[in-house]
Image (tube, rainbow, N blue to C red):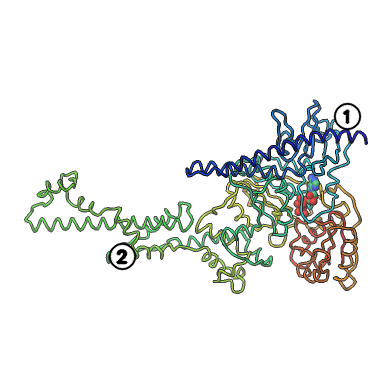
Amino acid sequence: MQQRHTEQAVEQEHVNAMYARLDGEVARVRADLDDAVRRSSTDPGEAYTREVRVAMLSRRARTLGAAEHHLCFGRIDGADGRSLHIGRTGLSDGDDQLLVDWRADAARPFYAATAAHPMGLHRRRHLRLDGRRVSQVSDELLDGTEPGQDDVVGDGPLLEAISARRTGRMRDVVSTLQAEQDAVIRSAHRGVTVVEGGPGTGKTVVALHRAAYVLAGFDEARADGVLVLGPNSRFLDYIAEVLPSLGENDVAMSTADHLVADALGVAEAPAVGHDLRRAAGDVRLADEMADIVRQYQAPAGTLTVLVDGDPATLDERALAEARQTAGGAGLPHNQARALFKDLVVDFVADEVQARARVLLARLDEDMEVLTGGVNLDRAAGKDLERLGFAPDEGGAFGHAAAVAELDPGALRAELADDLALERAVEAAWPRLDRDDVVLDVLEAHPELALDGALGDAEAWTAAHLPLLDEAEHLVNGPPAKIYGHVVVDEAQELTPMQWRSVLRRCPGRSMTVVGDLAQAGPATGAASWADALGSDLAKRADVRTLTVCYRTTAEVLEVAAPLLAEIAPYQAPSRAVRHGDEPRRRPAGGDLAAAVVEEVATEAAHGDLVAVVAADDAAPGLAEALDGAARVVPVSQVRGLEFDAVVVADPEGIRHARPGGERDLYVALTRPTRRLVIVE
Ligand SMILES: Nc1ncnc2c1ncn2[C@@H]1O[C@H](COP(=O)(O)OP(=O)(O)OP(=O)(O)O)[C@@H](O)[C@H]1O
């Protein structure tokens, strides 16, 4: 005990020095920020520099603000006697490194060292702070040495963290990240990293800490920003505090639906059933849509423009050539149309000039006949030269000079504004609206239309968003807002068409994709990452598997194991690090609601965060019966969430409510951190 207190006092001194430095840093950054904000300039260069400086200082101020809470959480002591403190931000005092940012390379052994691979460490120490006070110190010795006088052997900060009561909001776990998680978080891989693993293995934890790591370490992520995608708003609420607590406030968070709806300005796209989602998520639609758009691009035939009453016609070959040039330039439809129109204008202008040449030659001949063989050009050569016309190679002015008077630039400009020409171009290569393209798709696929959706852009549903996005890309080009790194959580939930929307916004393909195919809902049914991401990307992806379950107890995992064997026989069950109460099963006895109310009352008496998980259509009735005594989560919304105690209402009902119901049930059973009750 005495030893513990001495160590605590030693650490308190270190921590005091860190906070003093932090306070100093906060004051300095604030002053610099005030100063930068005050310094306005009319010079655009200076104004830009100021803006960059303000953004940089604001970011630093936020990082420092977030670091206040639990500033330092660890220390590593090397076998060589040197030690480093690890925390939420780096702090130094002159040459003295008071604190190392958890993301720095030097901090890696804190997470990765094990007794088998101590990475040169003698000791790993965890510190717990209560405000600015060191309230606990616990040590692990890694080099096999016997605990010495200065060692306080740890009492398992990880176990403590994962056994703690849940609040309904996820917290960062930067102080207890485990080696297999840390390896993914700090991976230098710049392409797609896929992280798979069973329920509760920390995929979300890894995804969010990776976002923070990438922001600090990857230039492209800092420049273009990081986007985190989750399956629904409930989930985004649940994880909302993690990145800010790591000092990262600038990460965009969205769902795949909102991402597209916001980008396209589609106000409210109502949710729909999985059937429509799945049908509209079929990747073959992408090719069909490209074909639909191509059919609007100068189909075979000829194109005639009336110029001053005379037709100028692009014959089949000329039209095919224009179509190929415009369509082959890799431009979106509406931009390619502009190129197509330029080509038509060129063609017609050449035609007009050729006609003028013929006309003038004929005029010359007529004049020679009329003037008895006198060539007027030659006769008036001196005058013409004085007027600025140059003679041609033969010394004559002839029609070249006259045709030159038809200024080609002006002629083209005139043709470009010509209504008849515009009409002919519009008929051959009409300007397209993304809605038009989707309406064409729906015409070919009546199963994709909702009642009243056809012809009514107001009636687009969430399922149609990826189609609208695809159409927008085909007709107007790539999205304006892209990201340097995209993190996709519950990635098994995205349909192939949704993946296309996501990839479009991450042209650098720097992504962290986390999910569990065994938990896939009925809208996607992806059986492999190649199904989801496309085989090219999946082939190049760095796939990691997390194996340890930090959420549920071994007893709960055991209840879910037969379902896992049924759904994903190829997947090894995760290993739980904790034991707990045996899950309870009880019959509903004819009144499901009454039985659930009773079980919730029993569970709530433990002071736990309790949730009831039920089939979607049973949830509202149960919520009414419970009258606020516990939250009721429809099973389609429960992916990624967790609660201390979970009452699963009517597992058979969940199993049969929708296709793939056994996966829903598997998700429901793996939500509790402590206790599971099944009301059958
Ligand atoms: N290293 C860790 N230290 C402390 N807690 C952890 C750690 N790893 C995971 N946890 C906790 O375990 C729980 C499950 O983690 P998480 O939600 O990331 O799992 P998941 O794999 O995403 O689960 P699911 O597949 O169900 O979405 C969370 O409460 C998380 O905080």
Along the line of sight, which residue is nearer the eye, 270 or 97?
97
Residue drawn where x is 65% and y is 56% of the image: 254
**181 lies above or below 75:** below
**594 lies above or below 41:** below
Does the rendering let one see residue 570? no
SS class, disc 2: strand
User: Residue 59: where, in percent of width, then height?
Assistant: 64, 44
Say what amino acid the circle numbered 1 marks.
Thr
Disc 1 marks which residue? 145
How dense is the environment of label 2, judged by Cα within 10 Å: few (below 14), some, or many (20 and up)? some
Q: Quadrant of the C terminus?
A: bottom right
Classify residue 615 as left or right of residue 391.
right
Does the rendering let one see residue 32? yes
User: Residue 146: where, in percent of width, then height?
Assistant: 90, 30
Residue drawn where x is 90% and y is 58% of the image: 606
Say what amino acid the circle numbered 2 marks.
Leu
What is the number of the mark on residue 306?
Answer: 2
